[in-house]
Image (cartoon, grey):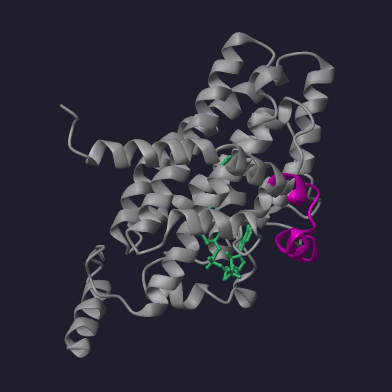
């Protein structure tokens, strides 16, 4: 029996068809998929904090409305992704518990502080830009619910990226102090954005198997290179420099060469020692604890709704 199921799974992957929730999958596939989807969901939820920090201080009503909409979208992305993880048998409450107890990861990028309003623009440009670069190929990921969630998420991330770039364009047309803010934010977020793609291929334990299962479509280094190639002309157009003296066009490779990423910094941030890790998790824990009464009320309401109506 397992042999037939395994054959069906292998055939589905080999023919690039989708795995659906009721299909049999190897334990490793389920585990990897839950890990990736949960980490992605946690990233969207924790990712609301750095920009959320600026909602009350947005410089105009228009910027405030845009930022509110963006942060709400991120909450929505987290919800689709937790739902996708649930189709694999994961329990949403347990996933949240794993996040706030530090047993599951979220993207390293959200452990850096947002010091000025230019950071909001740079997060849109570079962080959402990197997210799109990483996630567009995931629309073809082998797990159906994840791939379908990714289609909508990517559409919304494109809007996020454009609003960030438009904000930066506006600031670059402003005063010298505003241009300096944009350059400073770019300097601080460039390298952490490159780290979003994960460790180099040679030290990425999951890539080979995830590629074989069609979960990932490109390696971490391939996507990092794609992101660098895409960002250099955007930086030129914007009028900012990227903080990498080794960045130059390599005609032979048809790509930009770039300097070495500080992987020690990445390891430290992923281990919990980045500038804002403690603050981010504490804030998430508090929001979860403060929301306990809402969950209790929703459960009480659901139980009541199941009972026959009183005459
Ligand atoms: N930070 O073997 P690999 C967003 C972990 S975008 C922290 O290469 P894999 C939108 C990795 O999980 C950000 N941990 O792993 C937004 C693994 O953990 P393990 C979220 C990292 O999975 C924008 C270990 O290191 N996007 O939120 C990082 O094959 C603006 C070994 O690595 C996604 O999650 C990192 N940067 O490849 C929201 C996209 N990199 O096994 C708000 C989907 C790696 O020890 C504002 N995910 N690790 O538990 C993926 O594509 C993949 O999971 C990778 C990592 C590429 C991130």
Give the extent of the magenta segment: 262-280
Q: Going by the picture, which residue comes out furthest to the top?
A: 61
Looking at the picture, does residue 52 appear above or below residue 61? below
> In the displayed structure, does residue 3 sit left or right of residue 158?
left
Q: Is residue 46 left or right of residue 152?
A: right
Q: How many marks?
A: 0
Along the line of sight, the residue nearer the viewer: 184 or 89: 89
Image quadrant where one finds the N terminus: bottom left
Q: Position of residue 91 (x, y in %)?
A: 42, 59
- In this view, 244 is above or below 55: below
Q: Residue at x 66, y 60 (%)?
A: 102
Residue 194 spot, x, y in % from top left: 66, 53
Residue at point 26%, 66% (across, down): 19
Instruction: Name which residue lies at 71% across and 46% down.
Output: 282
**Where does residue 46 sit, x and y in percent of width and height?**
61, 44
Which of 10 and 36 lies nearest the eye of the viewer? Answer: 36
Q: Which quarter of the rendered image does ligand 1 occupy?
A: bottom right
Asked if residue 274 is among those painted magenta in the image, a careful observer would answer yes
Image vertical order of residue 58 relative to residue 227, above or below: above
Please tell me in which quadrant of the rendered image residue 31 appears.
bottom left
Quick one: quadrant of the C terminus?
top left
Residue 136 or 35: which is nearer the viewer?
35
Mostly what secondary structure, the magenta segment? helix
- Residue shown at the point (58%, 43%) measured from the top left: 288
**Where is residue 147 drawn, in percent x and y?**
34, 54
Query: Is residue 5 visible in the rendered structure shown here?
Result: yes
Residue 233 appears in the rendering: no
| Residue 180 quadrant | top right
């Amino acid at each position: 029996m397992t042999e037939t199921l395994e054959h069906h799974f292998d055939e589905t992957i080999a023919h690039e068809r989708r795995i659906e929730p009721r299909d049999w999958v190897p334990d490793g596939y389920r585990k990897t998929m839950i890990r990736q989807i949960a980490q992605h969901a946690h990233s969207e939820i924790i990712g609301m904090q750095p920009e959320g920090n600026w909602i009350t201080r947005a410089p105009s009503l228009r910027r405030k409305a845009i930022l509110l909409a963006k942060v709400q979208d991120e909450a929505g992305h987290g919800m689709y992704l937790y739902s996708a993880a649930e189709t694999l048998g994961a329990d949403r409450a347990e996933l949240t518990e794993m996040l706030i107890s530090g047993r599951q990861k979220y993207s390293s990028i959200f452990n850096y502080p947002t010091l000025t309003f230019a950071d909001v623009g740079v997060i849109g440009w570079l962080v959402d830009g990197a997210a799109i670069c990483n996630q567009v190929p995931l629309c073809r990921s082998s797990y159906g619910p994840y791939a379908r969630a990714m289609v909508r998420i990517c559409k919304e991330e494109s809007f996020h990226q454009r609003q960030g770039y438009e904000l930066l364009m506006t600031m670059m047309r402003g005063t010298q102090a505003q241009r300096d803010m944009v350059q400073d934010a770019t300097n601080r977020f460039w390298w952490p954005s490159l780290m979003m793609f994960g460790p180099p291929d040679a030290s990425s334990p999951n890539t080979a198997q995830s590629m074989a299962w069609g979960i990932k479509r490109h390696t971490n280094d391939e996507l990092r290179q794609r992101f660098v190639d895409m960002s250099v002309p955007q930086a030129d157009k914007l009028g900012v420099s990227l903080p990498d003296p080794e960045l130059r066009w390599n005609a032979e490779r048809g790509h930009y060469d770039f300097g070495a990423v500080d992987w020690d910094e990445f390891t430290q941030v992923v281990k919990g020692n980045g500038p804002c890790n403690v603050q981010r998790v504490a804030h998430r824990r508090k929001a979860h604890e403060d929301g306990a009464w809402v969950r209790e009320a929703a459960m009480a309401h659901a139980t009541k709704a199941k009972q026959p109506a009183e005459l």
